Amino acid sequence: MKKILVINSGSSSIKFQLIKMPGEIVIAAGLVERIGLDNSVIHYKSKKMNISEQVKIANHEDGLKRIAALLMDTEKGAIANIEEIDAIGHRVVHGGKDFADTIVIDKDVKATIKRLFSLAPLHNPHNYTGIEVAEQVFPNATQIAVFDTAFHQTLPERAYRYAIPNKLLDENYIRVYGFHGTSHKYVAEKAQDFISKKKSKVITVHLGNGCSITAIKNGKSIDHSLGFAPVNGLIMGTRSGDIDQSIIFYMVNTLGYSLNDVSELLHKKSGMLGLTGYSDLREIEEAAANGNQQCQLALEMNAYRIKKYIGAYAAAMNGLDVIVFTAGIGENSSVLRRMVCQDMDYLGIELENYKNNVRSSENRIISKESSKVLVLVIPTNEELEIAKQSYQLLV
């Protein structure tokens, strides 16, 4: 038996789970959210207690140190000492060309992750911080990296190449890498429990602060909305998603923006935040329900973008069996799921409204029995997927 602490440092949150493997027994789990805001919250659950506290958490380092302290707390904790932790499984967003598999972290691995900061500026730096802090707090544990990009290594060349000079791929490795791979892999495998046939055409829709959509044919990723870096594709919390690249040239050459200004705008000031002033979809939905037209339009734009990708991927796979909604927004926003699925009867998608409106943490069907396409909500568990891959590396 191995105790594996999984650390999933996102752009504004940290999820963590302490899991006993191979039994997949969760000893403790929690979430630090709204990092950097005055109303940061830390949730922590173990056999001893279940607590939520609103505290100011300035940055990811602060959040990770609080998690470690909770795990070892004499009253609230789940372990007596740090020696009980055998390994730390870290979610790392971008592995570039260097990492296609889960790997034990050493100095060279850290240096490469750091070099890739520019490709995933909202994530790799936080992933790296998680590694650095974990090395200090748990010095005897094996540090393991699980890369978001690994699941998408099966993309065919026609899907991962850009229509730019060949040398930029051959010499500079500019291509589609794809992200949220652990999430898409996990929910796609769970979706098979609902499908009688082994061969399947599945679209997984990961909607959180970061968003992506994947076409999965017979269990393998064949197309994906995020590309060289995790900023294009769907509309996200603060990221723009797809944008005409000529706008960037116009902003720099005509409007006087620096390249750093443009990068900051597209990564941190666009998306739902740029459209509404809010980055949290719960606040946007509430404002829209109260008549805020900007928020209503932003929801419509968000759903419209997802619908377009569903249509494209159904065409790419020559059919569609299943749509899976997952991650924080995908699992909890009945509003956005309804908006995505409405007027999609040409694809055979029929949503059952009363099923869609039920809040549950269970894997569930939300489509009508008559629907030709099965519509599922499957809560993602990237932490368990990371624990599985970490354990496989240890044994």
Image (cartoon, helix red, strand yellow):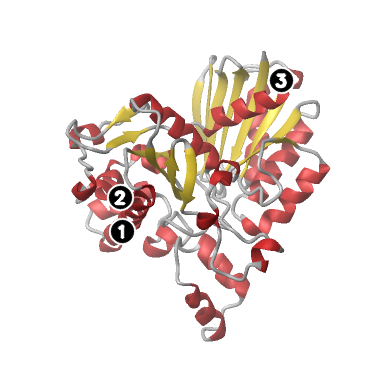
Earlier sequence position, callout 2 versus callout 3: 2
Task: Tell me the quarter of the image containing the C terminus.
Answer: top right
Mark drawn on residue 285: 2
Which of the two residues, 144 or 225, is positioned nearer the viewer here?
Answer: 225
Q: Residue at x 38, y 24 (%)?
A: 193
Q: State the separation of the CA atoms marked 1 and 3.
A: 50 Å
Estimate the x, y position of residue 179 in percent, counting from the top left.
Answer: 54, 47
Task: Tell me the quarter of the image containing the N terminus.
Answer: top right
Indicate the amino acid at tag 1. Cys
Q: State the separation of the CA atoms marked 1 and 2.
A: 7 Å
Q: Quick one: which residue is furthest to the bottom in this view?
A: 254
Mark drawn on residue 295: 1
Element marked by disc 3: loop
Element marked by disc 2: helix
Mark 1 neighbour density, 10 Å: few (under 14) some (14–19) many (20 or more): many
Q: Nearer the viewer, mark 2 or mark 3?
A: 3
Indicate the amino acid at tag 3. Val
Q: Residue at x 67, y 29 (%)?
A: 68
Mark 2 neighbour density, 10 Å: few (under 14) some (14–19) many (20 or more): some
Q: Nearer the viewer, mark 1 or mark 3?
A: 3
| Residue matched to label 3 | 395
37 with respect to 237 (left or right): right
Which quadrant of the view contains residue 103?
Answer: top right
